[in-house]
Amino acid sequence: MEKRNPKISVIVPVYNAEQYLRRCIDSILAQTFTDFELLLIDDGSKDSSGEICEEYAGKDARIRVFHRQNGGVSTARNLGIDKAKGEWIYFVDSDDVVLPSALGTFCSLINSHCEFVMAGFYSSDENNIVREQPRMVRQCELSVLEVLKEMYTPTDFCYQGYLWCKFFQRKIILQNHLRFDESISFNEDRLFIVEYLCCCKTLVSYSTKTIYNYIQRSNSAMSTLQKGYNKKFATDFDAYVLMHKRIKEYTKDKEIIKLAINGICDSYKTNHKMMLKFNQYDRDIHRHMFKCLLREGALPQYVKSILRPFFGYIGLLLFPKILIKLSNK
């Protein structure tokens, strides 16, 4: 008799996570809902992470391990999608903790017409001090347009671009050939969510019930941006451009399109402020972003948004290198 596929595929990209990996895996195996498979994608780890994955696979038949050369988190997640067998897909980061009721909560929110589920989380630092919790407790159904708006102006959390508080239907991913853009190093998760949403045709099940503990670490990719400008952060801008393109294809809603353009403008300003702060101006990145502002029709909105700090932001637009030299003096 052929083995039935699991209800859920939990995908965990793993890279040099030996310090946190056991706690993460243990939290997944401790789920009260047990009809799942766990896919551990070892993305070329140089520490003992790969061995830890194999150790757990030897103890639990629900675990499958895949080893590959290092290609980045998006490549690892894409491999997980290719290998998944579950009806639903859930992404987890290898240095975080999933609450015991997480998968059960997701499943309780699924109804006959559901294609996407969003749940709540809390964030803490490495000393277990809570930094963020849901602003209010609620459960409802939202339209796709309402959830797209949440991607830019979240209601109950400061940010909704995280994968690990979302539940994706594998059929939607496969039918629409959705994958993570491997050229994007920042904001690739929110880009994937937006692209997925634009393929949904039903209401979204939404709850602020906490299912995940996101641990903010001092050595995370975002934390390193406090120490210098990472040229890969320019792909955050590219992600906003791609989101804008996809949203324009999906809807004519002026409010959502305006939010998408605002995302492009804000990322443009953030990138240039960081170049200015760390004296790392890059002419090629500036030229690329400026061309995208023009091509996406974002320049008028950018100018409108900077009327008050006019000279500062116009300077970032036209004369960033001069401003850097002046600031150094």
Image (tube, grey):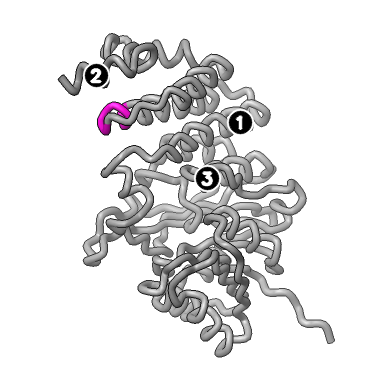
User: Is residue 92 depicted above or below 328 in this figure?
Assistant: below
Can you say whether 324 is above or below 165 in the image?
Answer: above
Residue at position x 63%, y 63% in the image: 80
Helix or strand or loop: what does disc 2 sit on?
helix
Name the foreground residue: 134 vs 298. Answer: 298
- Dividing the picture into quarters, in which one does residue 292 lie? top right
Of labels 2 and 3, earlier in sequence is: 3
Whether residue 27 is visible to the viewer of this picture, yes or no, is no
The quadrant of the rendering that contains the N terminus is: bottom right
What is the spatial separation of the Cα atoms under label 3 and label 1, in whole angstroms? 16 Å
Mark 3 crowd level (few <14, some 14–19, many ≥20, 10 Å Cα)? many
User: Closer to us: mark 2 or mark 3?
Assistant: 2
> Is residue 318 part of the magenta span, yes or no?
no
Which sits earlier in the primary sequence, circle 2 or circle 1?
1
Q: Amino acid at mark 1?
A: Ile
Q: Position of residue 217 (x, y in %)?
A: 30, 59
Outermost residue, bottom side = 59
Q: Nearer the viewer, residue 156 or 87?
A: 87
Q: Which residue is mark 2?
A: 325
Mark in the foreground, 2 or 1 = 2
Q: Is residue 276 magenta?
A: yes
- Give the quadrant of residue 130: bottom left
Horizontal and vertical percent for residue 121?
39, 58
Whether the residues at callouts 2 and 1 have beta carbons within 8 Å, the answer is no
Tell me the number on the disc at residue 247: 1
- Highlighted range, magenta: 273-278
* Disc with the residue nearer the chain's start (3 vs 1): 3
Q: In the displayed structure, does residue 85 sit left or right of residue 287?
A: right
What label does residue 188 carry, if any? Answer: 3
